Amino acid sequence: YQKGAIFYQSHKVFYTTLLYIGTFGLSALMCKVNMQNRLVKLLLVIIPPVFLATFRYNIGYDYGSYIWAYNNAFDMTYESIFAEYEVGDPIAYYLITKIATVFNSDRAYLMLLAILSLIPGVSYILREWDDMDTQPMIIFIYMFSPFIFSFSACKQGIALSILMFSLKYVYDRKPIKFALCVAMAFLFHSTAIVFLLVYFFLNNVGDLSTLKKVLIVVGCLFVIMNLQWILGNIMGGRYEAYAIDFVEGRNRSFWLYTCITFIFLLFRTKLVAIDKRNELLIMMMVVGTICQYLGFSNAFAKRIGEYFLMAQVFLIPQSIYLFTENTIRIVNILMIIYIVSIFLIVNPIASSGMGFVPYQFKFW
């Protein structure tokens, strides 16, 4: 019986993995469609993952709480949402949830959340990272990392997508537009406010000095060592529980991200020569990895690092330029294996049935 159960579980993992690879791979292939209309191309890229997100059932650890929130939204009014608002509340999410009740379908609600978590990030990738040698892999990794993260953390996933779009204004040195993006992300998840610091990573000419790198690392370590005090004194202490509650985890992601960040640092000079924007992205990986250390004591608090770890979406595909032209195809295959392996290691089969594996459908 035990061998049969293991065989059944392994088959579910295999077919779920194929489903994810096929869906996200299709989105990556859509990037290569030669089309002048950017809106149509954007739609072609996001349709496969939107379908996956819309018809999922019990996928994502917070799936149940989002469906519960949607069902309760029928008893809410727009007036009550604004009247009860306090700084830090995800009011944009509340409004979206209320708007979704018009469709009277939790599938339509999940579709709306998926679209919001895709459009900002994907539009930024299609517009700003248009190298056809790397763009498809950037899309593939985006789907397998930030997007699938939104299956569980929908609010934070939308915020992350908006913050990815805001990187354009960090590089272009447009502080007002950047601040507006962060403010919009803040209305979905208040932790997005930490991303304001990213703007100051670079100076006015887009460089990152050694002194500033040291200050950033020291600042991150200070935050980790004083997390309880910081969270207990901002926004009325609403996030203090993240520092007080001891939610132990194996924190596999810390070791994985530490290894890949070390590789980026090792090849930093070459990566920056390939694209100057990589200087900021590598620093973001350092910050995100340091944040992952929180996972040894609190598996929830480390999620703030996801905002910075999105840098891997752009850095990993560019590794093809670290090798010879004849090995690009092999490197791409190895990248796919690496991304899928990390996904399965960080997201094992959940005994509650609410993990990302195995995938379950619900069409109505």
Image (cartoon, rainbow, N blue to C red):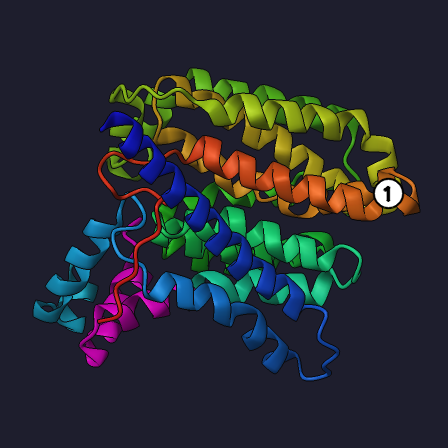
- Name the foreground residue: 94 vs 264: 264
Q: Is residue 260 above or below residue 354?
A: above
Q: Position of residue 2 (x, y in %)?
A: 25, 26
Q: Residue at x 34, y 31 (%)?
A: 300
| 133 sits left or right of 156 in the view | right
Look at the image and give the residue range highlighted in magenta: 86-114
Check residue 103 for magenta coloring. yes
Amino acid at circle 1: Thr
Q: Which residue is mark 1?
A: 327
Q: Residue at x 63, y 62 (%)?
A: 28
Q: Position of residue 219 (x, y in %)?
A: 56, 23
- Classify residue 164 by image quadrant: bottom right
Q: Is residue 97 above or below residue 139?
A: below
Quadrant of image for the N terminus: top left
Q: Residue at x 71, y 45 (%)?
A: 333
Main secondary structure along the magenta-highlighted residues? helix
* Residue 51 seen anywhere in this rendered image of the structure: yes
Q: Position of residue 256 (x, y in %)?
A: 57, 26
10 Å crowding of disc 1: few (<14), some (14-19), many (20+): few
| 292 sits left or right of 359 in the view | right
* Mark 1 element type: helix
Q: Residue at x 51, y 56 (%)?
A: 161
Q: Position of residue 36 (x, y in %)?
A: 73, 83
The image shows a total of numbered marks equal to 1
- Name the foreground residue: 46 vs 78: 46
| 201 sits left or right of 59 in the view | right
